[in-house]
Image (tube, rainbow, N blue to C red):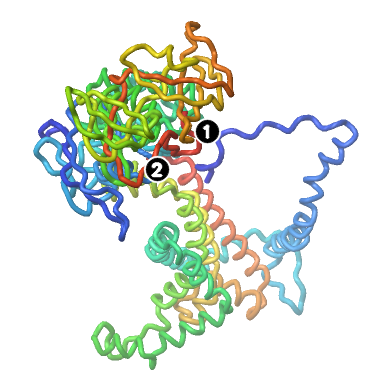
Amino acid sequence: MARETPAGDLRLADLTKRFGVFTAVDDLSLTIEQGSFFALLGASGCGKTTTLRMIAGLEEPTSGQVLLGDTDIARLRPYKRPVNTVFQSYALFPHLDIFENVAFGLRRRGIRSVDDEVARMLSLVQLDGYGSRRPAQLSGGQQQRVALARALINRPQVLLLDEPLGALDLKLRRQMQIELKRIQTEVGITFVHVTHDQEEAMTMADTVAVMNAGRIEQLGAPADIYEFPATAFVANFLGQSNLLAGEATGASGGDVALTAHGTRFSVPAGRSRADHGPVHLGVRPEKLILVGSADQVPAGHQHVTGVVTDASYVGVSTQYLLRTGWGTELSVFAANSGTSTPVAVGSEAVAYWDPRHAFLLPRDAADTDRTSPVLDEPVGASS
Amino acid sequence: MTLLAPTRAGHPPPAPPAARSGRRRLLPYLLLLPGAAWLLIFFGVPLVQLAAASLYDPSGSLSTGYAMTWAVSNYPDVLQAYWPQFLRSFGYAGLALVLALLLGYPLAYAIAQKAGRWKNLLLVCVVAPMFTSFLVRTLAWKTILSDNGALVGLLRDVHLLAPDGRLLATPFAVVLGLTYNFLPFLVLPLYASLERLDPRLLEAATDLYASPVQAFRRVTLPLSMPGLVAGTLLFFIPASGDYINAELLGTPNEYMIGNVIDSAFLVRLDYPQGAALSFLLMAAILAVVFGYLRRAGTEEVL
């Protein structure tokens, strides 16, 4: 029944969900290509899980459509949709063994001979021979894979993953990320993955949509979003950015000129999302290079001067805080590649960057410098 | 009954130091002592006494005294004399159980899963009638169902009852009384089971193509089995031995085995007969319970 509907892209059209006066998902429209690995990334309460639940049919949209191919499935009951979910809590049936958990969907659709298919699925998730165990006898990672097999066996058109790796420890999570990606490539089903972990989203997804307050802030390939974020929120939710408040004075000769804290800077027009009025000049911490004095800055680069207030050695890099003359602390990540000399805390230093690595974002007039990442879950819970 | 029990026993505690191990090993038995003593004095001894009485010479009486003659024939005799009451007991109790399940399962489910902040209030409502005595509640039903009562009047007016039809003193009244009086014993264990049911499992079931009916049959029902088994036993056992409902709401035509035992001991003073009946009832209930537990316990809940 479910497989007969025409295949195609998953399209959300003007999807809105309100709980009382609270708008969880606000007029959301996006297209998810068939066969892609799509990640909805956002902080808790941004509406990403609600969006997922509307696709699954566990939540009814206040308005808008969920289109699968040309069919609007927004008002179909969940058991009539060719969509399956891997739940955050896994929600394995405790009274059934692993075999029956995996066979559940097939049996409900009246398929009699399920043995081969279940065995194939269990081996896909590397749980051969676990069929007769109960969920409680399995570790978190194994349960997670059962949940995946239980959903995949139905060959849904879209597989929804609701923070499926949230309960796993870091090492297992990395392993499962690679695993999930392998399986997705193998089965070619559209995966829609909801997560608050930006690293997870970037590792796995072809396309990432960053959600904030029920809306999509930016959608694109992970590298594109990271290198050229659309908003200050994205710049600091996906990784970390140094955003300096400035005033753009217009484009000339392929560059947009701006003044920030009394200094003139420029950004290539192609990396500017605004060319006049209040702007944020953004540079990623790893694009900043720390040197002792201004005459070490190569030609064509721009720089700010300050005092190093903190240096944290984290193995692959050393993370510095540079307090500028106007009091903002910039983050600078210096790779420990052995080519740069460490900078002592308390010393004067200059951070320079290539303007082609900077980006320019429109800014609310009241907004000031923003340099700290958007912290979502308690630090320990995310990577 | 052990569906939700942990699948592995906990690790044994590390071996205690030798000096204290003796006391530690005794402690569980010491804790058992008061309960065991109670059971022995007030259940074990009377049970033996009753077993003995059931084998007394049936021709004896309270005034002439009883002789122990190992009169095993007491059993076939009482069974022959009172088998209709036996059948009626189990028939009425079974019927009341079906009614109670139809009422109680949805009620327990609603309280456990849907009541939200009204949960505690609704639970109190289920238990509150127990604050009045069993007798008073049954007498209240007698008033409600009485021939001059509003209910009978209404049913006669809408011709659901014949002009001389009645509710009181019918099998209907007895079954109704049993259903009402023992309903909380069914609802409470069921509630406890359903309260633990994770609603996300139902979401997962619907996500995996289970219609609401299938989700109930494949997930809700098996996961509520422990409560269902406990509740049906707690309902059925006292209901099949009950005599108050038949006495107050029925006539001798509705008498159950409890009424016969009651009269054997307290009216006819025929102790051997009363004791034999009691043992037969106990055996019958045990047989039913074991048969039921075997089925409910080992049945693959699929």
Q: Is residue A94 left or right of residue A82?
A: right
Of pointers 1 and 2, the one earlier in the residue sequence: 2
Tell me the chain of label 2.
A
Rendered residue at 25%/29% (across/down)? A257
Residue A174 appears in the figure: yes
Residue A133, percent from left and from top = 46, 28
Question: Given the current orientation, which residue lies at the most extreme right position?
Answer: B19
Disc 1 element? loop
Question: Given the current orientation, which residue lies at the most extreme bottom position?
Answer: B148
Residue type pointed to by label 1: Gly
Tell me the chain of label 1.
A
In the depicted structure, whether residue A344 falls above or below residue B21: above
Q: Which residue is mark 2?
A: A44
Disc 2 element? loop
Q: Is residue A230 left or right of residue B277?
A: left
Q: Residues within 10 Å of mark 2 (few under 14, many from 20)?
A: some
Q: CA distance from mark 1 to mark 2?
A: 15 Å
In the depicted structure, whether residue B105 falls above or below residue B255: above
In the depicted structure, whether residue B76 falls above or below residue A40: below
Residue A146 appears in the figure: no
Q: Which residue is mark 1?
A: A380
Residue type pointed to by label 2: Ser
> Is A195 in front, or is B212?
A195
